[in-house]
Amino acid sequence: MVPTATPSVAGRRVRTCRGVVTGDAIVGANIFRDLLAKIRGIVADRSGAYGTEPQRARQIAFGEFREEAMRLGGDSVVGIDLDYEVVRVSLE
C-alpha cells in the first residue's frame, strides 16, 4: 500500500479510481494525563502526555483508510489530507 499526499505516485500510473476512502481517529488524554501535562507544561514546551497523541491518531486514521482501500481493491491512496481538531476542557 502506497499512501501519499500528492495526486499521483512517482513511477506509477493511476489507472482506476476505486472511490474515496477515509480514516477517523478520536483520541484523548484522561484526567490524570491532563493534570500531568499541565504540570510538565510548566517545565517543558511539549509534554510527553500530549506529544504522542497526534501521532497515535494519525496511525489509526492511516490504518483505517489502508484497510478500506484494500477492501475496494486499491493498492495506493493518493491525495491524503489530514485535519486535526483540538477540544480542550479546562482543569482550572
Image: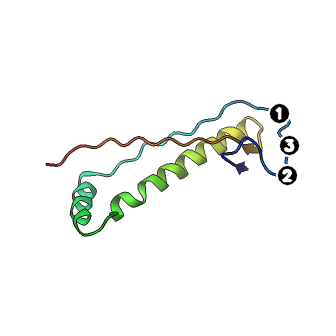
> Picture coordinates of residue 20 (x, y %)?
67, 31
Label 1 vs label 2: CA separation? 16 Å
> Picture coordinates of residue 4 (x, y %)?
68, 48
Q: Secondary structure at mark 1?
A: loop
Q: Nearer the viewer, mark 3 or mark 1?
A: 3
Q: Secondary structure at mark 2?
A: loop
Under mark 2, the amino acid is Gly
Q: Residue 16 bears which disc, if any?
A: 1
Which residue is denoted by mark 3 in the rendering?
13
Direction from residue 9 to residue 35 in the image, left or right: left
Label 2 vs label 3: CA separation? 7 Å
What residue do we see at 85% from left, 51% from top? 11
Q: Residue 53 bears which disc, if any?
A: none
What residue do we see at 28% from left, 43% from top? 88
Q: Secondary structure at mark 3?
A: loop
Which residue is denoted by mark 2 in the rendering?
11
Q: Height in image: 62 above or below 37?
A: above
